Amino acid sequence: MAVAIVAAVLGFTVFLLQYQPTSVAPDFALPTVDASGLTGKQVSLSSMRGKVVLLEFMEPWCVHCKAMAPQLKTLYSALSPQGVAFLSIVGSGGGTTVNDVSAFVETYGTDWPYVYDSSDSVFAAYRVTGTPTFFVIEKDGTISSTFAGETSIEALTSAISKAMG
Amino acid sequence: MLISTIIVLSIIGALISAYLTWIELITVVGTCPLSGFLSCSKVLFGPYSKFFGIPVAFGGLVWFLVAMALASGIKKRGNWMLALLVVWSGIGLAGVLVLFFVEAFLVDEICLYCTSAHAIGLAVIGLTFLIWSRRQRTAFAR
């Protein structure tokens, strides 16, 4: 009985530790996609070190990601001149292909890089379980805020402003 | 026997529909989940998942519950209940065809749970029409 309780406590502790949010944003390098398809270039998170980054994990078929797109565009217009970087990471969940990403970029006319995570490895590294999910990353590469689902522009702006210091 | 089968199938269909409705309702507002429901995410959380704000799965739940109630009433209240069930089955058939078209051609993903509910619905509809045609033949034979 005692062994079972200890095992349960240990197992629960391991479970909790697995799901602790990581403070350092895992680095990655993924291929960029524009309205024409794969560009042949890659973008890495480490290349954005020194800037505050708004990282969006999204899927083009997700109705909530579509709802956020125009709002993010407005936010980008306001914050990009201040040196904030935007990056959208698209996974392969639900059978998303490069063509789907291109169609999304063309439809919404977004101005920041979209990268394709074909193996969902970056999604897994950030423990993303739904879209959209936002991470605000500080200049030193640490995650300062996380938002799951449709998020108000005010909340995102506030978090980014806080990260900018 | 056939009526009992309709009732049992309706219960199973209602349970599946209730589960799908619950999944849609408990999911974090404004999120499309990716884990554990991977084959159904596009269907359950895409642009065609709700009808005037109500989860489509809830419509399936209502359909199965009404079908079960109508089938249960056939023995006591006779053919007019069966007639209502036939009409209800016609509505259900139209619904299944529309939903399958949406899944296959608009969403481009087939959700296993939704398809199971559709299959059970078609079985209920088929059995209803079978009972109806048998009773019609019996009535003509007299």
Image: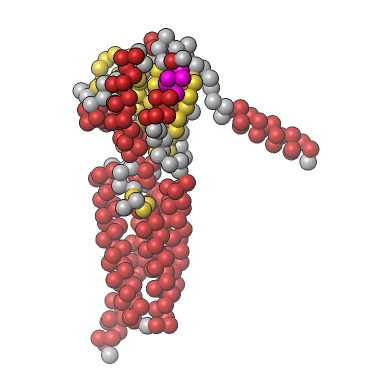
For residue A159, which quarter of the picture? top left
Residue under the image location 41 percent in, 60 percent down: B61
| Position of residue B25 measured from the top left corner of the image (x, y, whole percent) | 44, 48
| Position of residue B48 measured from the top left corner of the image (x, y, whole percent) | 30, 47
Q: Nearer the viewer, residue A24 or B112?
A: A24
| Color encoding of the figure | secondary structure
Q: Nearer the viewer, residue B8 or A113?
A: A113
Q: Is residue B134 above or below residue B15?
A: below
B99 sits left or right of A8 in the view: left
Residue under the image location 37 percent in, 63 percent down: B63
Q: Nearer the viewer, residue B131 or B75?
A: B75
Q: Is residue A96 magenta?
A: no
Q: Nearer the viewer, residue B50 or A73?
A: A73
Residue under the image location 33 percent in, 39 percent down: A63
A92 sits left or right of A107 in the view: right
| Position of residue A98 measured from the top left corner of the image (x, y, whole percent) | 28, 27
Q: Is residue B137 above or below residue B129?
A: below
Q: Which residues are magenta?
A: A159-163
| Position of residue A30 measured from the top left corner of the image (x, y, whole percent) | 36, 18
For residue A68, which quarter of the picture? top left
Outermost residue on the right side: it is: A2
Outermost residue on the bottom side: it is: B142
Q: Is residue A25 above or below residue B90?
A: above
Q: Is residue A61 visible?
A: yes
Q: Is residue A102 visible?
A: no
Number of callouts? 0
Q: Is residue A161 magenta?
A: yes
